[in-house]
Image: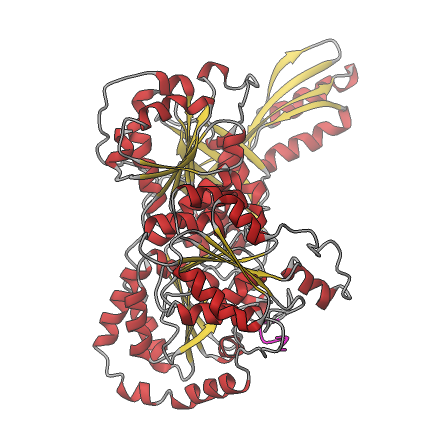
Amino acid sequence: MVNENNEIKKHILSILVDNQPGVLSRIAGLFSGRGFNIESLCVAETADPLVSRVTLVTMGSDFIVEQIKKQLNKLINVIKVIDFSDADFVQREMVMVKVRAKPEHRAEILRTADIFRSKVVDVGARCYILELTGDEGKVDAFLNLLKPMGIKEIARTGAIALARDNK
Amino acid sequence: MKALQSEGVDTIFGYPGGAVLDIYDELAKTDIRHILVRHEQGAVHAADGYARASGRVGVCLVTSGPGATNTVTGIASAYMDSVPIVVLTGQVNSNLIGNDAFQEVDIVGITRPCTKHNYLVQSLKDLPRIIKEAFHIASSGRPGPVLIDLPKDIMQATGSYRAAKGVELKSYHPTYEPNMKQLPKVVDLIKASKKPAVFAGGGVILSKASKELTEFVKKIRAPITTSLMGLGAFPASDPLWLGMIGMHGTYRANMTSAECDLLVAIGVRFDDRVTGKIDTFAPNARIVHIDIDPTSIRKNIRVSIPIVGDCKITLQKLNALLGKEKLGSLRKGRKPWLDQIEKWKATRPLAYTQKETIKPQFVVEKLYELTHGEAIITTEVGQNQMWAAQYYHFDRPNAFITSGGLGVMGFGLPAAIGAQIAHPDKIVADIAGDGSIQMNIQEMATAVQYKLPIKIVILNNSYLGMVRQWQELFYDRCYSCTEMDHAPDFVKLAEAYGAVGLRASKVEEVIPVLKNGLSIQRPVIMDFVVEREEGVYPMVPAGASITEMLLV
């Protein structure tokens, strides 16, 4: 392997692909077949219904990530690969968390939700479900604060991202 | 069918079955030549051999399920060696897909990682476009296999044929033109270099750049080696030729790579069989890497100047730039370096000693002499392949056809069939071992049926020789399961197929058998009973530096 900058870094890749069956499998197969790793993955249609955007978070040295990008570009159905670590970008994740709502904790939970601009989307006798969007750090911090109350379940999306308009 | 004909297809290698009955029915009404193989793996290897010998796209057609799965080894081999083929597979009716129907398999899923691209046709109207795209993708950029899966109901449907216009793939644009800013840097490195070397590979042959490569090498007067896949890209009879590099490369080629101060690598991918231990490969050299596939560059090895581009175009432009330079004194200054290489050549040449029993190298060398180096050679995989590479000296491209990347035993016989169909007038010989020839021996029937005068040269040591050699060197001579002490009588086997069988067991029989075999205009098996424990040398142990050669 090339001995250059071997520092392992997180990279958010935004991959524009043909919106066709089997394309996700080609991408996932490339990662598993070549021993690259996927931290998270989000796929949805773009403004153009013929094109989907795959937002994929991966870890690797510059050398590995360069190879990942080249391999992705080689797939016939991949239109464009953007690495956000080279650009100014906005990143968001979303989480829904079901937290135990003991009477003595309810005020605390609601106050935390308020501070993080989280929404309460379901209120039950024993649990609340809260919804939050934000970057990875914000979501992690939110979950850490709720942990002492007793988290029952978490559903969390991977990151999605867009580059900022260059002014 | 019309779509296939419009791509210039005149030959298909195939095997019919339930899901492709409709295609075969239509095929009978065209003038496309169909070669009926005896196993679907043979169809793909034959299409591969045809493509490599002719420089055109090879086509094969098989049925669904097992027909499709039997093609996988052939497809994977073509993928590793970047061979342009299109594989048409039958599929069950579209409404049955996913229902575990009879002879159903998800071949698009199975072949996704070993095709350049693949398609499941979902509507008849897409078919002309898909066929056009498939041929374009298979043959452009870095070539490779493309598979098209054809559900039976769509093949039964009829419609008026509307030819697809051009290919419009918004996400596929191979880079042919090199970055012109990089090329002057290469010229500067060449001028500054005292000990340059060139390392070429299969990419040169694929882009038909042998002439340009030869001009380049002579201009800069640098010694040249190639990978296994690059043999024939540069004439082996030229004094600048070093022989093959790598695990079974020549002493001088491996030493040159270790000592050079500049390595110009063209159309190669720095496979582990070439580099040995990566950290010690060409330790003193600046490396220029020219390849059309960006993923090949910086995949395995550090590179000083990466150039993404077609080998032919890039070499043309480099030659034009070099044409403006005064290189006379540069060429004179090469003398000490070339003298050093001559010394390596003189002290450690490729050699063997012919005693009482037939040496396999002797057979290959005599085959080379008797065919004047003009035969198309296919090989199986193992010792036979390496002796073919070392002792048959290729002066022309597209003459050495071997499963290099995947290393498929059973490749040579069907590949010879494909090559012979592409070149009916040339001598096509498969250099085989007694183990690997049995892996697709059924294709003898194909050769006989189509009267293809292929020559099969079996170097018969009653061992799986290459594995035995590793066991000898690295596993204390524990010859576990490598002795093939129960093999058919290949002479009788040839006769049973309706071919000619000849055998040589003594040294003096080798030349008469070869002469006789080469003169017969029918398929011939020549069985050479050779020294049982002969090894392929030089040999670099796996994972060692390529200068750590075992020489015997």
Query: Residue at left 35%, top 42%?
Result: B137
Magenta range: B545-552
Please identify the quarter of the rendering in which residue B131 is found.
top left
Whole-percent x, y for residue A85 in the image: 48, 47
Q: In which quarter of the image is the N terminus of chain B?
A: top left
- Please, is residue B340 above or below residue B264 in the view? below
**Residue A121 included in the magenta stretch of the image:** no
Dominant SS type (magenta): loop
- From the viewer's side, name the closer residue of B41 and B84: B41
Residue at 23%, 80% (x, y): give it: B325
Query: Picture coordinates of residue B197 (x, y %)?
Result: 42, 76
Residue B523 as seen in the image, left or right of residue B6 = right
Position of A24 compared to B317: left or right? right
Q: Which sits in the foreground, B42 or B257?
A: B42
Is B546 magenta? The answer is yes
- Can residue B56 be spotted in the picture? yes
Residue at image position (42%, 63%) is: B230
Image location of residue B171, percent across then percent down: 34, 39
